[in-house]
Image: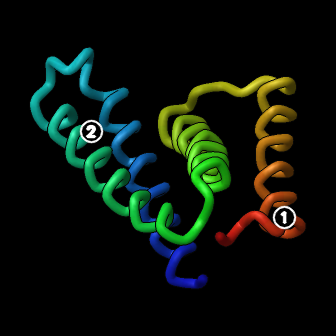
Amino acid sequence: MVRTYLLLAIAIVAEVIATTALARSDGLTRLWPTLGAIGGYAFAFWFLSFTLKVMPTGVVYALWSGLGIVLITAVAWIWFKQALDLPAVIGLALILAGVMVINLFSRSVTH
């Protein structure tokens, strides 16, 4: 199961990198950020596909999208100085709480 979570973590990081590149691609008009986004998403989906062999699709997607949202928001906040208001912070905390509930209490994590 550790290997599965490692593959999922790699997929999440690749997705965050790809989304960051996509935001910098200026509507897919800048070559290197566009290629980074395309490559990052391909890499992310490739690693994500391995986790789907072991974990249910809904659980994988919940973890991948939830942690991806929180991480890309952190990247945008820290590196690109995008402001977060209190409702955004509360929403992100709720997403993290949902991810924790799935991992700590759900028996659906493995097939």
Residue at coordinates 49% horizontally, 61% vertically from top-left? Answer: 52
Along the viewing direction, whichever of 19 and 63 lies nearer the viewer: 63
Indicate which label's residue lies in the foreground, 1 or 2.
Answer: 1
Report the quarter where the C terminus lies: bottom right
- 17 in relation to 69, above or below: below
Along the viewing direction, whichever of 59 and 15 lies nearer the viewer: 59
Q: The disc labelled 2 sits on which kind of residue?
A: Ala
Q: Name the residue under label 2.
A: 37
Q: Where is residue 58 in the image (x, y as percent from the top left)?
A: 64, 48
Give the secondary structure at mark 2: helix
Q: Mark 1 points at which residue?
A: 106
Q: Are marks 1 and 2 in contact (CB under 8 Å)?
A: no
Q: Is residue 68 left or right of residue 26?
A: right
Q: The disc labelled 1 sits on which kind of residue?
A: Ser
Q: Position of residue 8 (x, y in %)?
A: 51, 65
Q: Residue furthest bottom?
A: 2
* Crowdedness near tag 1: few (<14), some (14–19) or many (≥20) residues, C-alpha within 10 Å: few
Q: Where is residue 92 in the image (x, y as percent from the top left)?
A: 77, 38
**Quadrant hosting residue 21:** top left
Give the secondary structure at mark 1: loop
- 27 in relation to 96, above or below: above
Q: Position of residue 110 (x, y in %)?
A: 67, 71
Q: Residue furthest front?
A: 111
- 43 in relation to 103, above or below: above
Disc 1 and disc 2: Cα gap in Å? 33 Å
Report the quarter where the N terminus lies: bottom right
Q: In this view, does 72 lie to the left or right of 95?
A: left
Q: How is the image coloured?
A: rainbow
Along the viewing direction, whichever of 56 and 9 lies nearer the viewer: 56
